[in-house]
């Protein structure tokens, strides 16, 4: 028969239990998080780190709280507990390396056993240089994508996300700072997936939302909701686009530049539904985009400048059937030689081509060809998908040589996007 650990030698983990009791239940309003609910939250964090074979249950949590298990042996499990309970260190959860032992340290060669402790504590100190590097890496990846296209960017970004996921929280200045870094990288992964045509885009955007909520960063929660609205617009779903963007605008104390970006999505959603107030929302976005905003949080929306907003205004006019004014506005946007992301230029050309289509199918096809050039440069299948309505609309004029050329090129690009 196996010997049981004497009850007198167990030290109940009151700290872990207290932290759990402070966390609200996700399913039972007014009550604290239960042991099974904590286990489910820890498993979610493990899965987010791509650890799929170390799930725990409520019984395991109970053993930790009762002192039957002093602390999770695996680093990644302790990281998952810290994230699920939103604390900065193992000590906050009673996972101390100084927990009582039944063996007196001096009897096992205390000097060698204890010398490892300061080294461990040293390794767990915040590494603020490393914390700053994630933003530099994110900016570098964005610059590389703009220079070389989306090709191979997914694996690069996935590697960065996984590295961040495995860094102990102690190496950051706070739990929130690590969650914000993960939110930024998850959003970038969703953007890459959208441009690659990968199915995982919505999953990564959901992860970005969860991390932004844990980081308590309302401006980035709003930004992720804006991206969800953008994805709904790409799918032609005006209703859900409005739902997401209204939720984004409800976030507190948003910088004006982020508000401007949100208003562009609201404008396009209303125009897609055939509502002329879309142009009023575009006008509001234009006013907000010109306001000087010193808030550092506004930097994530720095691309939402006057030209960007004008392009949305032109898009809204096309959707509302005002093709002549749409052509005028979008021509001015594309005449501006200020550098802009290739994906944005490709989409602006797509919208201009749609504005040309009713009156000038040849010009529409030629403009569509220019958009396809940017697809090949950027690797963004969003451009090809956005050209689909134009291709369908031009089919009746396919006997016109330039139209035939465009339809053939678009079909080849669409096939490449589907298979590659």
Image (cartoon, rainbow, N blue to C red):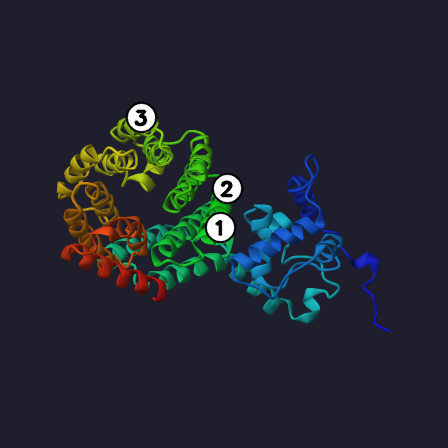
Tell me the residue at 41%/60% (across/down).
Answer: 158
* The image quarter in which residue 321 lies: top left
Secondary structure under tag 3 reads: helix
Secondary structure under tag 1 reads: helix
Judge left or right: residue 264 versus residue 370. Answer: right
* Residue most extreme to the right: 1
Mark pair 2, 3: CA separation: 31 Å
Given residues 256 and 417, the one toward you in this image is 417
Q: Nearer the viewer, mark 1 or mark 3?
A: 3
Judge left or right: residue 60 versus residue 174. Answer: right
Q: Earlier in the sequence, mark 1 or mark 3?
A: 1
Given residues 247 and 281, the one toward you in this image is 281
Location of mark 3 (residue):
280
Of the 4 image quadrants, the one containing the C terminus is bottom left
Residue 167: give x, y in percent of width and height. Answer: 48, 58
Location of mark 1 (residue):
207
Residue 174 can be seen in this image: no
User: Looking at the rendered structure, which numbered label has been put on residue 213?
Assistant: 2
For disc 1, the neighbor class at 10 Å (few under 14, some 14 to 19, many from 20) is many
Mark pair 1, 3: CA separation: 33 Å
Tell me the residue at 82%/57% (across/down).
Answer: 8
Of the 4 image quadrants, the one containing the N terminus is bottom right
Residue 129: give x, y in percent of width and height. Answer: 37, 53
Q: Nearer the viewer, mark 2 or mark 3?
A: 3
Judge left or right: residue 308 versus residue 14. Answer: left
């Amino acid at each position: 028969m196996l010997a049981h650990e004497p009850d007198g030698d167990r030290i109940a983990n009151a700290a872990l239990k207290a932290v759990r009791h402070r966390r609200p239940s996700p399913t039972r309003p007014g009550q604290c998080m239960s042991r099974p609910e904590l286990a489910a939250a820890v498993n979610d964090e493990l899965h987010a780190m791509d650890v799929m074979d170390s799930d725990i249950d409520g019984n395991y949590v109970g053993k930790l709280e009762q002192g039957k298990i002093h602390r999770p042996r695996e680093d990644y499990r302790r990281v998952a507990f810290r994230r699920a309970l939103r604390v900065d260190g193992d000590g906050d959860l009673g996972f101390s390396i100084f927990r009582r032992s039944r063996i007196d340290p001096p009897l096992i060669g205390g000097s060698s056993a204890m010398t490892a402790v300061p080294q461990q504590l040293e390794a767990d100190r915040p590494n603020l240089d490393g914390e700053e590097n994630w933003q530099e890496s994110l900016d570098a990846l964005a610059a590389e994508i703009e220079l070389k296209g989306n090709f191979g960017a997914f694996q690069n970004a996935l590697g960065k996300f996984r590295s961040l996921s495995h860094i102990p929280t102690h190496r950051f200045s706070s739990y929130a700072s690590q969650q914000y870094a993960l939110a930024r990288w998850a959003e970038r992964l969703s953007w890459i997936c959208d441009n690659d045509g990968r199915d995982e885009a919505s999953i990564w955007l959901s992860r970005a939302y969860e991390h932004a909520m844990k980081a308590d960063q309302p401006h980035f929660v709003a930004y992720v909701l804006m991206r969800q609205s953008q994805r709904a617009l790409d799918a032609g779903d005006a209703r859900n686009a409005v739902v997401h963007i209204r939720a984004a605008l409800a976030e507190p104390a948003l910088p004006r530049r982020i508000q401007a970006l949100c208003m562009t999505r609201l404008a396009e959603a209303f125009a897609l539904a055939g509502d002329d107030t879309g142009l009023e929302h575009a006008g509001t976005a234009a006013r907000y985009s010109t306001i000087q905003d010193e808030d550092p949080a506004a930097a994530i929306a720095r691309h939402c400048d006057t030209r960007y907003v004008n392009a949305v205004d032109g898009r809204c006019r096309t959707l509302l059937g005002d093709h002549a004014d749409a052509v005028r506005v979008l021509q001015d946007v594309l005449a501006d030689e200020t550098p802009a992301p290739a994906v944005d230029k490709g989409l602006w050309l797509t919208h201009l081509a749609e504005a040309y289509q009713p009156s000038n199918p040849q010009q529409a096809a030629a403009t569509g060809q220019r958009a396809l050039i940017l697809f090949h440069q950027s690797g963004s299948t969003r451009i090809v998908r956005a050209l689909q309505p134009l291709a369908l609309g031009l089919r009746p004029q396919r006997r016109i040589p330039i139209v035939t050329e465009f339809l053939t090129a678009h079909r080849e690009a669409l096939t490449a996007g589907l298979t590659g």
